[in-house]
């Protein structure tokens, strides 16, 4: 009952879904934008909460690596986990906006929809997209989530993971069927990923949606690792063998261009 009362007070009776404990934790983290380190007493005074409450928040954040406590002074500062999250956010934002001009050029040259995605918790997330100019075209949106095993983007990204991580994705998400062409066995997926590594390109042959085909190539980061992928999508009627042969080098070249912009050492030499 005390927690419910406290929760209602924190949300001011307006938002039934606001968690008071999480709200306090975020309030504490926000304070570190004002100064690099805080004592327990200073934070309690700054936020108007008693020390016992703030101590529990600080202890929880410290245990999960979001804050670090200096043993000599007892002061709290930001932990490595927050730095890692900030670095990841900046990296994804850099990818999103640096990829835009190359995507626009490829979409203009081909008339087809092009997009960039990353693998997050075993699922492909679209981070940038430029729609094609054809009346009939593939529609998507930033933030769209797609199954990795059935998409060209996902197969590119899975192909460059260790086998154990691929097995983990399969265990977590399974291999559900979306069309008659969807790969639904671990052996079939491993064979497809092997072809991706050999060809440097992944294909979605109407595996996630009937009548839709995609081609994808890896984008490498400063460490030279494939951390994102570029794909072009079009109706199957426009993606016959001749068109695919024409598009493959364009997709690879655009992915390489983005990789160079991101400082990929393997692409810098190219």
Image (spheres, grey):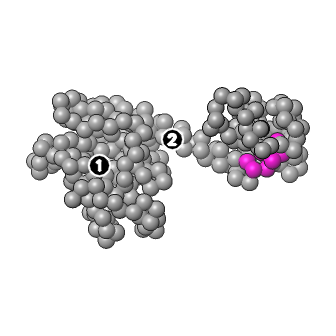
Q: Which residue is mark 1?
A: 216
Q: Secondary structure at mark 2?
A: helix
Quarter of the image for residue 44 reads: top right
Numbered badge on residue 151: none
Q: Is residue 13 left or right of residue 246?
A: right
Name above or below for residue 64 compared with residue 233: below
Name above or below for residue 76 compared with residue 148: above
Q: Where's residue 77, x and y in %?
A: 77, 42
| Mark 1 neighbour class, 10 Å CA radius: few under 14, some 14 to 19, many 20 or more | many
Q: Is residue 210 left or right of residue 155?
A: left
| Magenta span includes 221 | no
**Mark earlier in primary sequence (2, 1):** 2
Which residue is at the front of the view, 238 or 264?
238
Query: What secondary structure prevails in the magenta region?
Result: helix
Quarter of the image for residue 107 reads: top left
Residue 134 in view of the camera:
yes
Which residue is at the front of the view, 40 or 14?
14
Q: Residue at x 75, y 29 (%)?
A: 34
Q: Residue at x 37, y 48 (%)?
A: 146
Q: Where's residue 270, x and y in %?
A: 33, 47
Q: Where's residue 103, x and y in %?
A: 31, 35
What segment is highlighted magenta in the picture? 54-62
| Mark 2 neighbour class, 10 Å CA radius: few under 14, some 14 to 19, many 20 or more | few
Numbered badge on residue 91: 2
Residue 196 in view of the camera:
no
Quarter of the image for residue 13 reads: top right
Q: Where's residue 228, x and y in %?
A: 40, 47
Q: Residues under labels 2 and 1: Cα distance? A: 20 Å
């Amino acid at each position: 009952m005390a927690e419910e009362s406290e929760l209602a007070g924190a949300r001011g009776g307006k938002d039934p879904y606001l968690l008071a404990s999480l709200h306090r934790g975020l309030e504490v983290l926000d304070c570190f934008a004002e100064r690099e380190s805080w004592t327990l007493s200073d934070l309690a005074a700054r936020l108007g909460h008693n020390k016992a409450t703030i101590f529990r928040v600080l202890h929880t954040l410290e245990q999960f690596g979001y804050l670090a406590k200096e043993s000599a002074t007892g002061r709290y500062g930001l932990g490595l986990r927050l730095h890692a999250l900030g670095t990841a956010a900046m990296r994804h934002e850099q990818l999103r906006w640096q990829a835009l001009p190359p995507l626009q050029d490829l979409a203009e040259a081909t008339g087809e929809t092009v997009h960039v995605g990353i693998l997050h918790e075993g699922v492909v997330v679209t981070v940038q997209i430029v729609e094609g100019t054809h009346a009939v075209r593939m529609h998507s949106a930033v933030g769209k989530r797609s199954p990795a095993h059935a998409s060209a983007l996902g197969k590119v990204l899975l192909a460059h993971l260790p086998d154990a991580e691929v097995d983990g994705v399969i265990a977590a998400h399974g291999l559900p069927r979306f069309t008659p062409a969807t790969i639904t066995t671990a052996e079939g997926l491993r064979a497809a990923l092997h072809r991706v590594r050999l060809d440097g390109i992944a294909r979605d042959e109407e595996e996630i949606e009937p009548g839709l085909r995609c081609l994808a190539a890896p984008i490498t980061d400063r460490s030279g690792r494939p951390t994102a992928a570029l794909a072009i999508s079009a109706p199957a009627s426009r993606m016959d063998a001749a068109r695919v042969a024409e598009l493959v080098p364009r997709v690879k070249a655009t992915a390489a261009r983005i990789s160079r912009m991101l400082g990929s050492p393997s692409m810098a030499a190219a």
